[in-house]
Amino acid sequence: MIDIQLIRDNSAEVIRRYEVRNFDATAPVNRIKELDATRRQTQKQLDDTLAESNALARDIGQLFKSGRGNEAAALKEKSLLLKQRAKDLQEQLDIAANELSEVMTSLPMLPHHSVPAGKTETDNEVIHQEGELPELFKDAVPHWELAGKYDIIDFEGGTKVTGSGFPIYKGKGARLQRALISFFLDEAVKAGYTEYQPPLLVNAESAFGTGQLPDKDGQMYHVPSDNLYLIPTSEVPVTNIFRDMILNENELPVKCTAYSVCFRREAGSYGKDVRGLNRLHQFDKVEIVQVTHPEKSYQALDEMVSYVTTLLQKLELPFRVARLCGGDLGFAAALTYDMEVYSAAQERWLEVSSISNFETYQAQRMKLRFRSQEGKNLLAHTLNGSALALPRIMAALLENNQSEEGIHIPKALQAYTGFARIS
């Protein structure tokens, strides 16, 4: 949730900034102002009533002690009226506060001033591109055909066992998958991230804290009997480790990494965009998460982009970095960079990482704060990014490195795979 003080101080600016998201915030912002005024006024009336009631209770006690029971009894009638008024005001306050929370929750994060205007991913701003695009030999094929040719991924078997979007990796395909996970985790630890192994299911409070609920309710697999959700990314459990915590300023930044299986009920379509590994319901991913001081969060965001850049360089993959436009920006993010690798056989760019600064959006929901050197409790900033998501990395590695002799494994991975070629 955004800071309500921003709406109190400059609601016109808030509405203008939301226009970058192609979102008309006029009605909800005006309703928030009304509810906030009602809540504050009701709270004052309740405080005054309780103060009067407490003072009256003390007077009644003194009257009884001094033997003036008749006067005390007369005041008790007024005391009962004050208690009933306090009860009524508390109910009014709860109604206003609950509606205010609902409207605030419905608002996405305010976009950073650098977010470009635009409606779809075609309006995203490419800010960097690196590496030569491979030129494949005449008989090169996309990864879903390579998977069958070299018997490394069984798409049909996964569909039989579970359904589409649940591939089975086998042989050198499984070893390459495991090698990528180990490589990404080792690199993250070397970069100063502490490794975690989080649960694969979370409760509703955790899903709300990082913004998956209510915005992405339909995209998560839900276990109704336990009211638990399969995680769409390890960002959810890892960030929620710090929910309801007050960190010391000298503990920041907190840097975490985690590997997990991820589950997403994304609505599938047909065609090359979702074939093979391009879009899955279950996939592996290594995530990096940071909790930072608000004044240093955009420096941390740049560092995270730079770090993922080094991973792609070591994997010898051509890639580009795109700043997402307002229309493509995630609900909870203030600024997001997408990292995309080039898939030579498909002749298209594939997103392999989104790196986002959520500023105080998640921290507000999770009550994640830090104690400043001056002793004030302030909201932290949270960030996360894929480092990296495996399916499309695997697709690009297989396609870009194919030759008539087999599939070359990048040097950085050979110590992990134990082989230099799939043939």
Image (cartoon, helix red, strand yellow):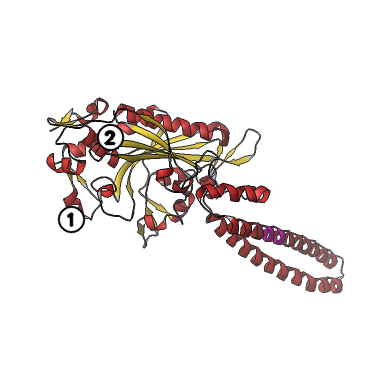
Could you tell me what secondary structure mostly forms the magenta stretch? helix
The residue identified by callout 2 is 180
**In the rendered image of this protein, does residue 127 appear above or below residue 106?**
above
Residue 262 image offset from top left, x and y in percent:
33, 47
What residue is rendered at 38% in x and 32% in y? 308
**In the rendered image of this protein, does residue 185 appear above or below residue 273?**
above
Are the residues at dot 1 and dot 2 in contact (C-beta closer than 8 Å)?
Answer: no
Q: Amino acid at mark 1?
A: Lys
> Magenta span has 37?
yes
Q: Would residue 419 be visible to someone looking at this image?
A: no
Magenta region, residue range: 36-42
What residue is rendered at 84% in x and 72% in y? 69
The residue identified by callout 1 is 160
Residue 89 image offset from top left, x and y in percent:
69, 66
> Magenta span has 223?
no
Asked if residue 48 lies left or right of residue 349, the reply is right
